Structure formats: C-alpha cells, structure tokens
Amino acid sequence: MHSLAWLWGVSALFLLIPLLLWIWSGSEKDFQPTFRKATAIEEVLPLGKDSTVWPVVYQQMPPLESLTVGERKRVFIALMLPTILIIKQQREQEQQKVEALIVKQHHEDLSREDSLFLEPLLSRYKISHIKALPSRLKTHPASLALAQAAIESGWGTSRFFAEANNIFGVWSFDPDEPRIPAKGNRGGKRVYLRKYDDVLMAVTDYFTVLGKGSSYARFREARIEGKGALQLIPHLKYYSELRNKYVSMLRKIIRKNNLLQYDHYRLHARYHPQDTLR
C-alpha cells in the first residue's frame, strides 16, 4: 500500500499529458470528456487540490476490495465525482433552456426546434406541461449523490456495482430491460436491479429517478428552494426501506467523510456539456 500514492502520482502525470496538450493547443472545438476503462487503481486520475475536476468518465471500474478503507473511499470518490458533475452540468443547462422557453412561450409560439428539445424531456419525466420541468431538472449537491452512491454500493464493493454498474441501488420492474436478480425474495417475489453499460448511464438514471418519482416530490420542492445537502436528507426517507435509519446513515456518512467539500468542486472551465454525451 505504500507504493499506491507513488503510482497515483505517476498515473496522474500520464493521464494529464493529453489534457495539457489540448490546453496548450488552444482548441476547444473538438473537446469531449475522456471515456476510460480503469482496470487497475493506478489508472484512476486523482482529484486535484484546486477544486476542479477533469471530465473523465470511467466505463470500467477497478476492484476496490483489496484497498484499505481510506484508500477505497478516496478512489471511489475520484471515480464517481467527475461523472456526477458532468450530469449535473448537463441538467442545469437543460433547466436554464427550459426556463427561457417558458418565458418565450408568453410572447410567441415555440418553434419546431424548441419542441424537439422539449419532447424527450417531457417523455423522460412523464409529464405534459413545460412548467413542471424545471423542478424535475434541478439537481442537488454532489455530496448527497456521493453519500448515496457510497451507501448503496458499499463504497464500490457491492455485487451490483461490480456486475451491473448499479451504483445507486436502483430496482428494476421491467422484465424487458437489462437487469440482474438480487439475492433472496421480498414478499415471496423475486427482486431485480437495473444493469447499466457504464457509470455514466447509472448516474444519469439516478438523477432521473429522483426527478420523476412521486415519493420525491417534497425533495424536488426543497431542491428548488435551494436547500443544502443536510437539509435535503430527510426528504430521501423513502429512497430506502430503512426509512429514518437511512436518513441517519446519509447524514453520518456526509459528516464523517467531509463530503460537503465536494459541493464546491467544478468541472474544468473549458468543458462544454453540449459536446459531451454520446
């Protein structure tokens, strides 16, 4: 384990070379985040100390079980935070555009281009009116997403994480979608969890689940009101069967691991979300 920090340093330099070359070239036009398969711990780019994050999406995760608890948490956050910030920025951009279209709608008819933008969003959240979209698209602090990911995946050691990239313990009720069975039954019925191709899909679906689930209506209201992570936690009571115990677990994991610091992290300034997702 003593060599892990050195390996991370070497890995960081190796991964930063193409990013530095891109910066020095002065070209933003073709920039997209790096989609990377990390088969070993040293291939995970550690977070910088300047509160900026390079948009690296990990399509494959290295095994974390052999690490010490401290190292496991550090690597897990480095794996998860960039993708969380990418999806947050994308949703925030969608929200801003929707709010502009709501204003536009009062003065003129929306264009065909506007409708093509809105239709998939309305379908995603199963709503019919544009005015209901901003609260669905509003995101919450990264610390809360990290805390839920840590609990639901056991800091990246759960079977669902390893076999299905299911970081947030999202259940599946559709037999036609990719999924894996959970161990045991609930109420005499087999339980399944969704299976994702990569962490990008998992994080995207997580924000969608919280954006449309009826159990999270008060959570969404609190997000719109600008509540912080610790104030939002009680409204996630129904995310888990543990109910109030889950609320206590979230609060404890955020405080114990100083996750609030990541609410101030941002993607590198030259990152443009419209050029990102596949």
Image: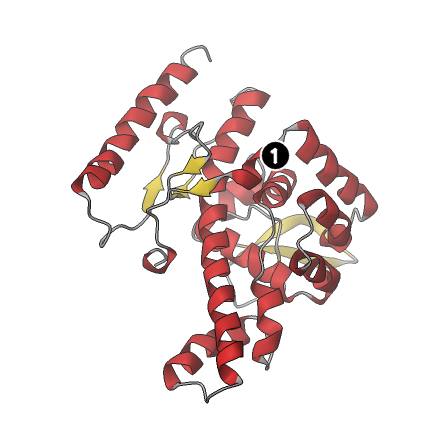
Q: Depth check: give the residue in front, 148 or 47.
A: 47
Q: Depth check: give the residue in front, 225 or 113.
A: 225
Residue under pointer 1: 259
Q: Is residue 275 left or right of residue 88?
A: left
**Residue furthest out toward the left:** 25
The C terminus sits in image quarter: bottom left
Q: Position of residue 139 (x, y in %)?
A: 58, 55
Q: Is residue 72 above or below residue 229?
A: above
Q: Residue at x 32, y 47 (%)?
A: 270
Q: Is residue 146 left or right of residue 30?
A: right
Label 1 environment density (alpha carbons within 10 Å; few <14, some 14–19, many ≥20): some
Q: Is residue 14 left or right of residue 55?
A: left
Q: Depth check: give the residue in front, 149 or 265.
A: 265
Q: Residue at x 44, y 82 (%)?
A: 115
Q: Is residue 153 above or below residue 201?
A: above
The way the protein has been coloured in the rendering is secondary structure
Q: Residue at x 46, y 61 (%)?
A: 93
**Callout count:** 1
Q: Depth check: give the residue in front, 7 or 133.
A: 133
**Residue furthest out toward the right:** 244
Q: Position of residue 240 (x, y in %)?
A: 73, 50
Q: Residue at x 42, y 75 (%)?
A: 117
**Residue furthest out toward the top:** 2
Q: Is residue 90 visible?
A: yes
Q: Could you say whether the residue bearing mark 1 is in a helix, strand or loop?
A: helix
Q: Is residue 72 above or below residue 140?
A: above
**Residue furthest out toward the front:** 107
Q: Is residue 174 visible?
A: no
Dot 1 amino acid type: Leu
